[in-house]
Amino acid sequence: MAVDELDARILTLLLERPRTSVREYARLLGVARGTLQARLDRMERDGVITGTGPTLSPAALGHPVLAFVHVEVTQGRLDEVGDALAEVPEIIEAFSITGGGDLLTRVAARDNAHLEDVIQQLISLPGVVRTRTEVALRERVAHRVLPLVASVGRR
């Protein structure tokens, strides 16, 4: 799905001013409310816009330790292990990957001891061969898509 300049401007406003009304977005962009709503609906339908809820901080929820856990899986058990990972509340993301390991998870923990407990839980899952953990020390670039939106909008 191509994102044109107006779409990029809409997405930029959504990211910069998420609590603004559709009417106000339309006014700021100088387009009809119906045009804006049609664009939003299309971008949601096409999967460009994937959510509208608040972004929450695991640290503020009492889980300040962030780790990336690589999970090596027995051949043929990737889906089974992926489903089991979805049942672990401390796993806030998981991806199938190439390279070292089969899955990469992002884990939020209360402290290092809690992280160890989560890792032990992962190791005990049927189909998990081994794990490798990297603890994040400091966030250098927060999750963002605004620079990407800007670059797509310029094309």
Image (tube, rainbow, N blue to C red):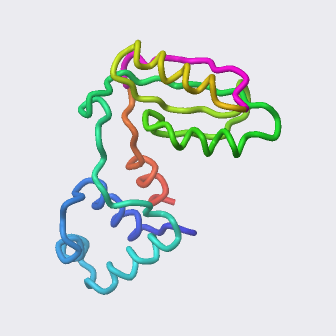
Q: Is residue 57 magenta?
A: no
* Left or right: where 64 falls relative to 48: left
- Place residue 30 in its image quadrant: bottom left
Say which residue appears at 22% left-offset and 57% top-offset. 17
Between 133 and 30, the one lying in front of the other is: 133
Q: Where does residue 98 sit, x and y in percent of width and height?
A: 73, 34
Q: Please tell me whether residue 130 belongs to the stretch shown in magenta.
A: yes
Q: Position of residue 36 (x, y in %)?
A: 32, 78
Judge from the rendering whether residue 131 lies leftward or rightward of residue 142; answer left or right: right
Instruction: Give residue 63's quadrant in the image.
Output: top left
64 or 75: which is nearer to us? 75
**Which residue: 33% across, 22% down?**
110
Quarter of the figure with residue 32: bottom left
Q: Is residue 92 above or below residue 1?
A: above
Rendered location of residue 97, percent (x, y): 68, 36
Q: Nearer the viewer, residue 2 or 66?
A: 66
Residue shown at 29% from the left, 61% from the top: 14
Quadrant including the N terminus: bottom right
Left or right of 33, for residue 99: right
Residue beneath the point at 30% across and 86% down: 34
* Image position, residue 12 (x, y; %): 33, 58
Q: Is residue 13 above or below residue 129?
A: below
The span shown in magenta is: 127-139
Q: How many marks?
A: 0
Is the stretch drawn in magenta largely helix, strand or loop? strand
